[in-house]
Image (cartoon, rainbow, N blue to C red):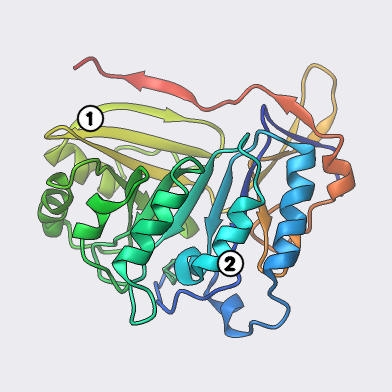
Amino acid sequence: MRHPYKTRESGATVTIFVPYDCHNHCPFCINKEEYADLTGFSAEKICKSIDRMHAITPRCDFVFTGGEPLANLESLQVMLDHIPNTHKIYINTTLPVSAQQSEEDIVAFTRRNKHKITCMNVSRHMQKYVVESNDTLLSKLAVPFRINCVLYKDYPNKDLLPYMERFRVIPGASIQFRFDYTATTPDNLYEEDGDVILQDLKKIARYTGLDGCRMRCGFHFDYKGMELTYHKTLPYSTIVETDPTNGVTYDILYDILIKQNGDIHSDWDGTLLDVEAYEKVIFEPYDLRWLEKIAS
Ligand code: SF4
């Protein structure tokens, strides 16, 4: 480790990559290659790493992603049951329905876990990259959900309105549009005039404000009463910064990753977390704040 760690109060978000493939092929996916060879993937090792992270930051957020967390509900249940209820838990999923797993299986899973799951982030991209289950399943979920949509390269902006109308009629729906994170840089993170997606959204929805921090930001909108966010995030999770009050340079961590084999990483590029050093992490106030709020 080059520098001591610093993170926000409550700790960096811990993203858990489940050991199950999603069988989709989104062009912007940076995780797909890892699922080509499942050797070493282990839910048991993931649980051990969950324990280590809980011991250091007992109130951090956990995110299950993949791959597809709902590809094996039994195993996901074991991992979920391993997380004490001091944590918020988010699940990134496509809501996969198949001959082996019915809609009712998924609904029953959400009912069983409605006190554990903070929100399900359901991938529904405008360009059809993922196999989709029926939209009616969304309103049957027993937990809050949000639609996630990556607007990739030359996305068809004429389809934005029909896409928003599709989800507006589903009770409880909100949409998070996402900029392709592999293309985000510190220079374009907060760019507004040259950001095509932002300008497209401003034409069709009411802009309500901007929140953000060093690492990510969200432009907020209201579309006929449905909440929309346009989210941008940098493609790494560590920022190196010198604290002017004491001259010490820190690795400031925003996300920690538990990989499919249980390894704990401090960034998306394969950097291993020095867990013993993280046990001595310094906490700073959370820097995500409203930067602009438009009165309705
Ligand atoms: S559904 Fe998610 S994990 Fe699967 S290919 Fe698409 S982005 Fe990657």
Question: For mark 2, what is the residue?
Answer: 75
Q: Mark 1: give few (<14), some (14-19) or many (20+) Cα within 10 Å.
A: many
Question: For mark 1, what is the residue?
Answer: 207
Q: Of residues 119 and 247, which is closer to you in this image?
A: 119
Q: Position of residue 21 (x, y in %)?
A: 51, 76
The structure residue drawn at horizontal position 58% and vertical position 84%, both measured from the top left corner, is 36
The structure residue drawn at horizontal position 19% and vertical position 46%, both measured from the top left corner, is 200
Q: Kindly tell me whether residue 262 is visible in this rendering.
A: no
Q: Of residues 151 and 123, which is closer to you in this image?
A: 123
Q: Position of residue 41 (x, y in %)?
A: 68, 75
Q: Position of residue 280 (x, y in %)?
A: 87, 34
Question: Regarding mark 2 in the picture, which secondary structure is present there?
Answer: helix
The vertical placement of 165 against 56, above or below, is: below
Numbered disc total: 2
Q: Earlier in the sequence, mark 2 or mark 1?
A: 2
User: Which amino acid type corresponds to the residue marked 2 in the rendered image?
Assistant: Ser
Question: Regarding mark 1 in the picture, which secondary structure is present there?
Answer: strand
The vertical placement of 249 against 137, above or below, is: above
User: Which one is closest to the eye, mark 2 or mark 1?
Assistant: 2
The vertical placement of 91 against 284, above or below, is: below
Q: Of residues 117 and 209, which is closer to you in this image?
A: 117
The structure residue drawn at horizontal position 11% and vertical position 57%, both measured from the top left corner, is 158
Image quarter where ligand 1 lies: bottom left
User: Which amino acid type corresponds to the residue marked 1 in the rendered image?
Assistant: Tyr
Q: CA distance from mark 2 to mark 1?
A: 41 Å
Q: Is residue 60 left or right of residue 207?
A: right
Q: Of residues 194 and 3, which is closer to you in this image?
A: 3
Tags 2 and 1 touching, CB below 8 Å: no
The structure residue drawn at horizontal position 71% and vertical position 35%, both measured from the top left corner, is 58
Q: Position of residue 195 (x, y in %)?
A: 31, 45
Q: Is residue 214 left or right of residue 256?
A: left
